[in-house]
Amino acid sequence: MNPGFGTPRTNKSESFIVQFVTVYLSTKLRVPQTLYSVYGEFCAVHDMKLCLEKELSSLPPSPEENASCPEEILLAFAFEQIRSGILDETYGQVGECIKRYRLSLAIIMGLLTDVTSEHDRHILLKYENGLQIRIDNLYGRRRVIG
């Protein structure tokens, strides 16, 4: 018997957290409802993690040419920030919108330093100019509104 827990540990793969919560929930203490919901979410996330690990381990390794390079990941993040900034702008959150646009602008300017293709440089410059104009317009709107 483990002192303080009341039941011996039978499953060696069971984590300490799961054992503690299980024993805590089985005692006659008053348990807040949030603990039940947190425990349920923890179990659901843990199960999902195990399923994803199993699926990922069964996938064949991807060739290098199909793997995303860091520049693609950064550009995708910058575009996601632009989309979120557009939503912020739509709902009148100009300050948050400007932060997102400036982050995207910084990423794009950083990518411009390592660009080798003239076509890619032209596209990134177009985004940079568009973001800069948008940020300047929003600063003007912010001064008028605020």
Image (tube, rainbow, N blue to C red):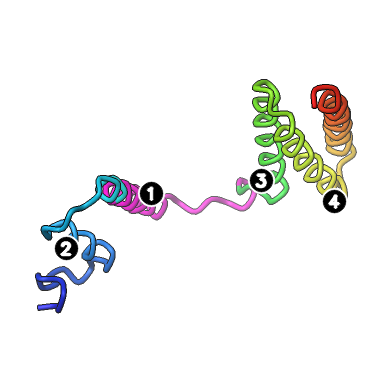
Q: Disc 2 or disc 3, which is closer to the eye?
A: 2
- Sequence-earlier tag: 2 or 3: 2
Say whether residue 102 is magenta.
no
Q: Which is more toward the observer, 29 or 64?
A: 29
In front of the other: 31 or 118: 31
Q: Amino acid at mark 2?
A: Val
What's drawn in magenta, residue-wise? 39-66
Q: Earlier in the sequence, mark 1 or mark 3?
A: 1
- Structural crowding at the residue carrying mark 4, measured as other residues with C-alpha within 10 Å and reported as few (<14), some (14–19) or many (≥20): few
Q: Would you say the residues marked 1 and 4 are in contact, meaning their CB atoms lie under 8 Å apart?
A: no
Q: Which residue in the structure is indicated by mark 4? A: 114
Locate residue 74, reporting x and y percent: 70, 46
Instruction: Give x and y (percent) for residue 94.
Output: 73, 29
The residue wearing badge 1 is 52
Q: Main secondary structure of the magenta part?
A: helix
Amino acid type shown at disc 3: Ile
Please give the residue where the numbered disc 3 appears in the rendered image: 73
